[in-house]
Image: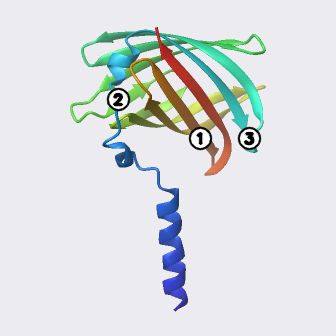
Amino acid sequence: MWRSVVTLVFVFHLSACSNAIDEYHTSTPSFELFEYFEGDVLAWGMLQDRSGVQTRRFEVEIRGVVKGNLLTLTEDFVFDDGEKQQRIWSITKNADGTYIGEADDVVGEAIGIVAGNALNWRYTLRVPVDDTTYDIAFDDWMYRQDQVRMFNTASMSKFGFNVGKVTLFFEKQ
């Protein structure tokens, strides 16, 4: 009896927490990563700690160049405290429609999967804090709103525990 109850609770918990990419299969407009990011895109975002308190805000100027199955994204960040950062992504589109992303501060590869208007990236980012660095796991979701706008939320975790969230709004220029 108890096994049945525990199994039922576990299955219910998994289904309630599910955010599978397939749920977006029929959502429009379709997410065309290379088409959206080719050229200039502006973004605005914020970081929140694990309790939801906003800790930083930032703006990003993004320039995308497509050559065949490779998208190079140059992201120039300016934070509300004046700090500037640059990240350059090399993103390859695979024959099966998935994406592989690489950047200097990404540990290994970012894996991206698209369905409908959504793209889900999973990767580990090496984040400098004071005199050390932390490897933070990202579960990153992008949602096309229309031809110009896109939303992005990313959950950050360390050792499986939530450490924060990133929220961005994109506008293609």
Nearer to us: label 3 or label 1: 3
- Assign a secondary structure to mark 2: loop
Q: Residue 128 carries which label?
A: none
Q: Sequence-wise, which precedes: disc 2 or disc 1? A: 2
Q: Name the residue under label 2.
A: 31
Q: Is residue 85 left or right of residue 1?
A: right
Q: Sequence-wise, which precedes: disc 3 or disc 1? A: 3
Q: Which residue lies furthest to the bottom in this view?
A: 1
- Under mark 3, the amino acid is Gly
Residue 90, quarter of picture: top left
Front residue (pair 55, 143):
143
Front residue (pair 138, 130):
138
Q: In this view, does 94 lie to the left or right of 130?
A: left
Rendering coords of residue 141 (x, y %): 49, 36
Front residue (pair 129, 98):
98
Q: Which mark is residue 52?
A: 3
Q: Which residue is pictured at 43% across the width and 25% down the height?
A: 102
Rendering coords of residue 40 (x, y %): 45, 7
Rendering coords of residue 5 (x, y %): 53, 83
Q: In this view, does 159 lie above or below 32?
A: below
Q: Are marks 2 and 1 in contact (CB under 8 Å)?
A: no
Q: Sequence-wise, which precedes: disc 3 or disc 2? A: 2
Residue 133, quarter of picture: top right
- Under mark 1, the amino acid is Ser
Q: How far apart are marks 2 and 1 (CA)?
A: 20 Å
Q: Residues within 10 Å of mark 1 (few under 14, many from 20)?
A: some
- Assign a secondary structure to mark 1: strand
Residue 166, quarter of picture: top right
Rendering coords of residue 67 (x, y %): 28, 10
Q: Mark 1 points at which residue?
A: 155
